[in-house]
Amino acid sequence: MKQLMELFISESRELLEVASKALLALERNPDDNESLNKVFRSTHTLKSSSAMFDYDAMTELMHTAEDLLDKIRRAELAINSSMVDQLLESLDLVVQWIDYVEANESFPNNAASAAKGLLNGLKALTSDSLQPDADTLTAKADEKPSKKTSLDKTTLADTTKHSSFLTESLVFLRNDQRRTLFRSLLANNASVDKSMLLLCYTPEPRCFFDDQDPFELMRQLPDLQLLHIEPTAPWEDLDEIDPYHCQLRFIALSSAEPVIVEQYLTSERLQPEYDSYSPLELIYVDEGEAGPAPELAQTLLSKLEAEGIKGLTEEAVKQLMEPEHSAWQGLMLSWLMTLAASPLASPETLKKLLDALANGHEPRWFEQSTAAKSEESVAVAADDDVAKDEFAVVMMDTDENWQAFKQLIKLQMQLLELPSEPALWHGIINSVARTACNALIYIQRHSQTELINSALQQSVSDHNAKPLIAALKDLLDSAGVADESKDEDVISDTFSGQDEGGEKAAVSRTLKVDQGRIDQFMDLIGELIVAKNGLPYLAKRAEQVFNCRELAKEIKEQHSAINHISEALQGLIMQVRMMPVSLIFQRLPRVVRDLAHQLDKKVDLVVEGEETEADKNVIELLLEPLIHLVRNSIGHGIESTAIRREQGKNEVGQIRIRAWQESDSVCLEVSDDGQGIDPEKVRQRISKMGLLAAEKINQLTDHEIIQYCFMAGLSTDAKVSGLSGRGVGMDVVHSTVEQLGGTVTLHSEVGQGTQAVLSLPLSAAVSRIMTFEVSGQNFGLPIDCVVETMRLPLEQVQHIKQSATFLWRDQTVPLIFLNQLLQFDQNKQKQDNKVAVLVIKHLGEYTGLVVSDFHGGMDLIIKPMAGVMVDIPGYTGTALLGDGSVLLVLNLRELL
Amino acid sequence: MSIRFSNRVVYLENECDADDAEPLLIWLREHPKGKVNLKNCQQLHTAVLQVLMAIGPGVTVMPLDQSLARWLPLWEKNDKKL
């Protein structure tokens, strides 16, 4: 049950995503039938699957939404934005429910009341529609099945309905097929008042969940004569087929007594639409144009009256040969002969058919009094027009075929092994090969003829029958394998590779794997890397402690081999975790639409580079910052329509989102053509908040100042609105990007627009860390932020007031003693009076960090701080080193 | 299991129930040229039949069971998105 629930949750999420995306597409282009169908199908599936868990509120909501969509689909309603709003809201509510279900494994109790408003809204929209104009058969079949009255009770109006049910249900049968059916119905039973029952059954789409098997039920119908199965709608695309959504319609014809069939239907609780008919009612012609032929009918009638049924048949055969009759008349003649040859043949029935022929209408069997019992029934030779029995099964590869093939090949082999006259040898070997090829073609193994031909050439050139015998033996072997497994159609790969070599490569096996397992896999690989990192330590120990250079060398060799494998493994698992950014991009249109509506702005969203891939963790974490950036662009960037018009800009603002890959990182750019960020306003804000000294504020360039927008609590917008202005959004962007080990930069030009560029590592799993030592403890920093490592002579350290600085690349760079910052003991000064300095770049500024010693770069997996350490500021996380010690990775943002 | 896969042929055997529909669908999606062998099939659940009708794979052997073979509909290859 839990698995089912998980499946339900993940599938519902996907469906909701598809539905809302399609709805937005539909709003843009109301004629987009494909999107409409997508929304419809998704809501439908959501409805069905929710019913499986008895989530009534969800089922009802989706059902109502489906009703509305159905009306739109049938063009009874035109879609408008209030419908889209209501539908989107419904989907949102379902999203909330699904979230709740996932968290609590139960459905929210207040769901029904929460859905009430939406339900009323949707129903109101649905009931605005016009009444359906015409009742088609499909629509009828979809409605609740209704039992029809039997023939003798029908009124005039019912008669039309009665016969149209038959003609419409059997529309898939051609005239000749209908004649075959007619004959087989009457083959064993000569009773004149014989009747047949026609059923049209459309099972409930969800019937599989109720353990129903309509096909089996229909197959077991007493005296089944015909079973036609068709889809209720054209098949969907392959990847949208839902195997558990029944969309079949069954049309069956039974020759059993109606009472027996009715009993069966009751016992199986089937409620198909059905009606009983006389086989006579199968006689009609629906091909060609009906053309009255009074003369022809008169000729036939006089024959019937003069010479009886036999005379009529003979005349009909003669007339059938006449070329001047129309298709319709020809078919009527064929029916006439079929009827004459059947137990139902009587002057009365034949006269009715002749009457129909004379007047060019369908036979009216029951217009007058009931048919009298046949006075005479003369058997005549069956007409020549015996159609192939369309209901017979075409056997494809049969046992017989294979047995014959095997025998034939065996015989050919024996023939080759017989001693033969050298003069005849060429003839024999050629004929054997030809026979084998023909046999292969017969059993549809064309591809294998080439094998035989090449073996033949070999045999001829070697003047030795062995290659051909071997080839024949191979054929038999492949047949033998098939035989053993009782399957005549196993084609061994060697052979199938010949004609469809390309296909084999194209066949891919896709696995759906739970992300948790991939994460576990990733963790294990991480530990493997850590364990591997232990080997160099071991080598060092072997050399230094045990003085065993040989062993150290061997360990190092092993290390490099394991290193190679673990790197390959890591690369592979990285690829598995790669996902396209389109996964998050597809959420954005909705955000843009809603915000633009809310603020009454016109915004166009352009998305580029959706196929760019990055690690799943990165992708998932990116969604939030991306949404904040887009919100900011709409809220602060893009001006209102009026202002844009005044400024001569396009009324519709544009937000452009671009993704691309740049070496080891994935870059995302969110740009808008709005008003841009005014650096002066930022300066004012910074000084007001006292974030920087006044002189510093003025020193910084506009570009540098703008970067301060990422600081928490800094918003240049005077008014705080529902969607932006609290200054939290940009902080989220910055902290998320930093958490992922990436960078974010803002570019802005007043009046032209703003551009935020996020650069993130492709994978957040393994990071390259610069390790160093401070007062005997190991620390690390992401290597991306390290610009340079240098040994700085102490005399070059200058002191400006309280702070130490040094000159680096022609600029004064602040120098921070990490041991002081981390409150450790004094560094042990090196002999040469130099200090180790890491030059780092943080928020666009350079800083020198004084450490005790450098240790170099390492690939490490950083685990976030856990437990009581979560609240300790200054650290990003920890990593395990090869020698078992723990490395603390510093968080510059919090430290500096 | 009443469903068995080989490289290019899927075997539906004995009594195929509704649970077989999904693996069959997945396999047929992945093997656009895959075929079905129904030789030893005696019962075909509607869900399975529906998948066959929807995708329309080639049939290598029809069921030996005539009561099933007789009523199997003919299906056509679904060429959408292949």
Image (cartoon, coloured by chain):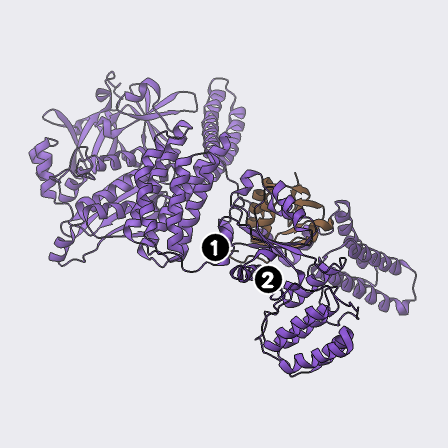
Mark 1 — residue?
A139
The hue of chain A in the figure is purple
**SS for dot 2:** loop
Q: Is residue B2 above or below residue A127?
A: above
Name the spot of residue A877 as percent of width and height, x first. Answer: 33, 26
Mark 2 — residue?
A172
| The one of A708 and A328 positioned closer to us in this rendering | A328
Name the spot of residue B66 as percent of width and height, x first. Answer: 73, 51
Q: Is residue A266 above or below residue B35?
A: above
Q: Which subunit holds the residue at mark 2?
A: A
Q: Is residue A154 visible?
A: yes
| The one of A889 and A684 positioned closer to us in this rendering | A684
Name the residue located 47 percent from the left edge and 17 percent from the top edge: A545
Tell whether A872 sits left or right of A346: left
Residue furthest out toward the front: A369
Mark number, residue A91:
none
